Image (tube, helix red, strand yellow):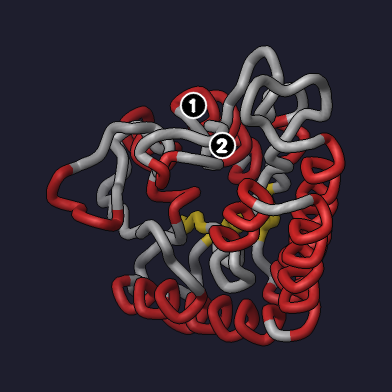
Amino acid sequence: MGDSYDSGVGTRTYDSSSGDCRRSPVAYAPLWAKANNPASFKFIACSGGRTPDVQKQADQLTASTSLISLSVGGNDVGFASVLTSCQLGSDQSCFDKVAEAVNQARTTLPAKLDATYSKIKSKAPSAKVVVFNYPRLFDLGTCGLGGLSKAKRERLNQGADILSGVISGRVAAAGFRFADIRDRFNGHGICSSAEWLNGLSWPINESYHPNTNGHSQGYLAAFKAAIG
């Protein structure tokens, strides 16, 4: 369950029946299911998902659900609009937009995460729940034509770290497992020599999301480690 980082946006390969949710057969969750052949498997993540959407997804959980993975929160604090502002505007306009998102992460997001995690726990009280944060999107070396300035990239990475801290705290309060994806993506951010994330891309919705390597080598490995 979860948002576009769970559904597989960025892999450029989608199940046509999933529509705008853009669920990919090469996202980490179906890759894990294919390798482990669980008795049942539901792939309900959806691009654009916010905490209220994930709470609705939780209606598909049951008391027999044993394992759940998700990420949520980025869209609640304006992930897409922040990146658009940073791509098109000045350094200062980017910094201002990141500051707005950080303020939302600190003030309004915790209660939204608490409500979401509580709903999941009520629907699947015996499940092992693995919650991901979001990777730092950027490496800080030289970036090609059209790449963001180093100052913008640094500020966006700092914002991601603050968001991760908020998510980590609420995950701990819920008693779930926190899967910190950041170290896995070190050296594989946008502007690295081995990118596991798409930079500015076409179609535009592929931008700033994990690619197939990000899912198979980053998220899948982190998920396996989290569940033991």
> Is 94 placed left or right of 57 in the picture?
right
**Residue pushed farthest top?**
193
Amino acid under disc 2: Tyr
Q: Residue at x 67, y 31 (%)?
A: 147
Pick whichever, 203 or 105, lies toward us: 203
Across and down, in percent, residue 1 comes to 41, 60
Q: Mark 1: which amino acid?
A: Ser
Residue 227 in percent (x, y) is at 59, 45
Q: Could you say which quadrant of the image residue 170 lies in?
A: bottom right
Disc ID at residue 216: 1
If the image is split into quadrants, where does the C terminus sit?
top right
The reply to whether the C-beta atoms of the residues labelled 1 and 2 are less than 8 Å apart is yes
Q: Work out how far the residue at label 1 is from the one at label 2, CA to CA, in angstroms.
A: 6 Å
Q: Is residue 117 visible?
A: yes
Q: Position of residue 75 (x, y in %)?
A: 54, 66
Category of crowding for the residue at label 2, using alpha-carbon neighbours closer than 10 angstroms: few (below 14), some (14–19), many (at least 20): many
| Residue 177 position by quadrant | bottom right
> Residue at 46% of width from left, 34% of height from top?
201
Say whether residue 84 is left or right of residue 188. left
Q: Residue at x 65, y 65 (%)?
A: 176
Residue under label 2, please give it. Answer: 219
Secondary element under disc 2, as helix, strand or loop, is helix
